[in-house]
Image (tube, grey):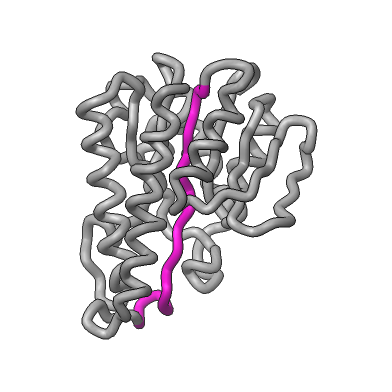
Amino acid sequence: MEHTTVVVTGAGGAIGGALVEAFADEGATVFAGVHEEGGRFADADRVETMRVDARDEFDVEYLMEDAARTGEIDLVVPCAAVFHGDPGEQRLADEGYAAFDDEYRTNARGVFVAVKEALPHLADDARVLVPSGSVAQEAKPGYGGYAVSKAAAEAVARQFAAEIEPAVGVVDPGGVASDLTGGQGRDPADVVGLFRWAATSVDAEDLDGERLGLSDWKQATR
């Protein structure tokens, strides 16, 4: 990934943080949007960290402009996500309006904002990888507005894929240990390879508007 410019929102989270570290280690210049001050990464020479609220288009606009100051953006990964409940226990009917609205604003609108603000700065062969999960396609009890918002995020990705030149696809790493999952799932470092593969090796037409998961990666790289 040398000589590429990458933007990751939600870089303070488990998946986002793992991707920032891995991509920088492989030679990319990474612009990491974190929600809280204090986010630090090992390769400070290749990572520029900025406080960014993924729900705020002005914050995201500034992040994208900063990333593009020396050239075009090659990869965008909008990782910012919230879940105002406990996995498996948050019934949609019991969810508060404020919680539902924030999940939608962060998880779905946040993807829209990231792609929209990146678009003027994307290289023609750029890629956008939208992280998602199985609950976006297969309803499971107890995931409330989070599941709804992730389904909406996938719809945002598909619509952009139908309308813009750079490839936009959904990447489902399965269950990953994070604050959103209560620490249950795979180590985030174990799914970095899936995102690297989607960013660098998959044919653009096989990514654009499609949904790639662990099984696709393992079958292609075995």
Relative placement, left or right, of 218 versus 154 is right
In which image quadrant can residue 141 be found? bottom left
Observer-nearest of 91 and 140: 91
Residue 133 coordinates in the image, percent (x, y) = 35, 55
Tell me, yes or no, if residue 189 can be seen here. Answer: no
Does residue 205 sit above or below 214 in this rendering? above
Observer-nearest of 203 and 34: 34
Residue 199 coordinates in the image, percent (x, y) = 47, 29
Does residue 35 sit above or below 198 in this rendering? below
Observer-nearest of 107 and 16: 107
Residue 76 falls inside the magenta stretch: yes
Q: Which residues are magenta?
A: 73-89
The residue drawn where x is 64% and y is 59% is 36
Residue 4 coordinates in the image, percent (x, y) = 59, 21
The residue drawn where x is 36% and y is 58% is 105
Does residue 113 sit above or below 106 in this rendering? above
The residue drawn where x is 50% and y is 42% is 60
